[in-house]
Image: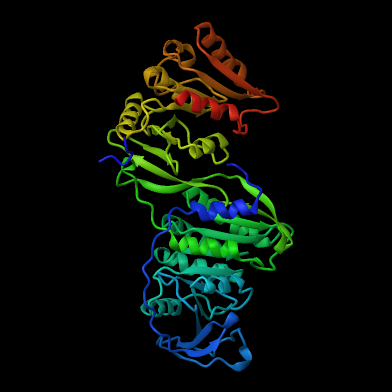
Amino acid sequence: MNLNRNGKIYDSFKVLLCLFLGGILTYPIVLKAQNVMAFDGKKSTWHDGFIRYDFIMDDSTFAITPFKAPDDEHFGVKDPPPGKHRCIVIAPKVAAPGNPWSWQACYWDHQPQTEVELLHRGFHIVYISATATLAPGKQWDAWYKYLTKHGLSPKPEFVGMSRGGQYEYTWATEHPDKVTAIYADNPYIPTDILAKIGELAKNDVPLIHVCGSFDPLYNFSTLPVEAIYQGFGARISVLVKEGFGHHPHSLHNPKIIADFMEQSFKETKTTIPDYAGKHAVASWFYSSNYIYTNFPKESAYITCRGPIFVPAYRRYQVTLPGVDAFTTIIAPKNPAAGNPWIFRADAVRRDDTVSFDMLNKGYFIVTGAVSYNADGPVLAQWNKIYKYLTGYGFSPKPTISGNGGAAGEALAWAIANPDKVAGIYMVNPILKSKGILKTMPIDTLAPLVKAKIQVLFVCGADDPSLDEQALVAQKRYKQLGGKITVIVKKGEAHYIPQGDAEAVTFITTQSK
């Protein structure tokens, strides 16, 4: 039935770019070419012979008029006279469809290689005076209005270095629905702006940060933004240059940044699938894996993490009738035949490599609702979730999974529905139930054995619950005639890596 019913770590830079260009940022949209009104600013030339238009804005009236740049400015720009803002537009030789543009938030012509590359790709590049005493204000709004009236896209992208990071985030968080993407380089982001970052996440604005490993701002700006964005399920990719401080900014080869900006502009909003419902909250789910690789042109090793470098999957928070909390569905890019899925009681961690392997194999991962009005999941509500999803073509026999204390609740549902289970895979299980069963799952294994359900537990040798939970369950299951495997990892405790090929093979085999 059609669903729309009516980390691996890679060590090759080439592979990284192939992953990115192959669709990490969803699907490209075909943009219709539009005319750009001719700019009447005074002409000069910028890098690689691109035409530069200069203007000056009156701060009180917001009037924008042509301005002749002084000859000694060369490619740069001087501070404006009092009561004025200097404004610049650099035009590509051929504008890309949709007329994308990049807004330089500060330090015009400093490390301009990303902007030059974007010009070659059909972006316009724009600037308005931004100095220590000229922060974003109404003049920026007037400049935006002027540019969009001239035909540029209503959603620009930003380049901001150091203070420029503060300024781009200042304007962007005030206008989160008018931003396509943000590139920040060793940015300074004060706490009042950090408090608004969630607005960009809600508008699905992708971010990329490039930072020095011991730049003082890395810990106080980029890491908080990254944590906030990941918490919201939004996309942020970070490149950390090992052994570098606040300077030099950018990358000598800006391709990876320009690729990010170009693909961000081309992407289209993902249609919410029917099974998620019209009111689903959509976000992203991607691995915490990172790549530490050599960038010869930068004379540096760079730590790379985020959805440019690892697959990002759509995650839907779904509210169903008769279920008093939300259900989470993480969707594979390409569902496998039969739409297999994993039904679990706890959220997937970003370091759970087994889950990412299964997503890559086309499995859905569903975290069942945990009632706000009970001590755990409610059997009748989980039955409704199961009925709802199978009605949309999900496999009638999911794999049941859970970690730690959540394993007991997932196992309890399997015991209550043994004919609806493909297999059971759990990590360091604590086999107790406060919601679904009145009896303890470890004492009620017979229905699973009778249904010939196979079980796999992966446990740490130093986990405190190993002896009284997993090993006791193993003994009882075997005594009842069931097939169960317990993998014990030496030197591991309760929280262990999830990289078991045995688990992937087990889930795949039981689902067939």
Q: In front here: 132 or 391?
A: 391
Residue 322 locus on image (x, y percent): 28, 33
Can see residue 430? yes
Q: What residue is drawn where x is 44% and y is 10%? A: 446
Residue 366 locus on image (x, y percent): 42, 35
Assign the C terminus to one quadrant of the image. top left
Looking at the image, residue 235 lies above or below residue 124: above
Is 418 on the left or on the right of 359, as rendered? left
Q: In front here: 370 or 509?
A: 509
Give the colour scheme of this rendering: rainbow
Can see residue 189? no
Tally the numbered discs.
0
Residue 180 locus on image (x, y percent): 45, 64
Looking at the image, residue 394 lies above or below residue 234: above
Is 339 on the left or on the right of 158, as rendered? left
Looking at the image, residue 146 lies above or below residue 417: below
Q: Quadrant of residue 498?
A: top right
Residue projecting furthest to the left: 6
Is 239 on the left or on the right of 201, as rendered? right
Residue 135 locus on image (x, y percent): 52, 76
Q: What residue is drawn where x is 50% and y is 39%? A: 360
Q: Quadrant of residue 252?
A: bottom right
Assign the N terminus to one quadrant of the image. top left
Q: In front here: 338 or 298?
A: 338
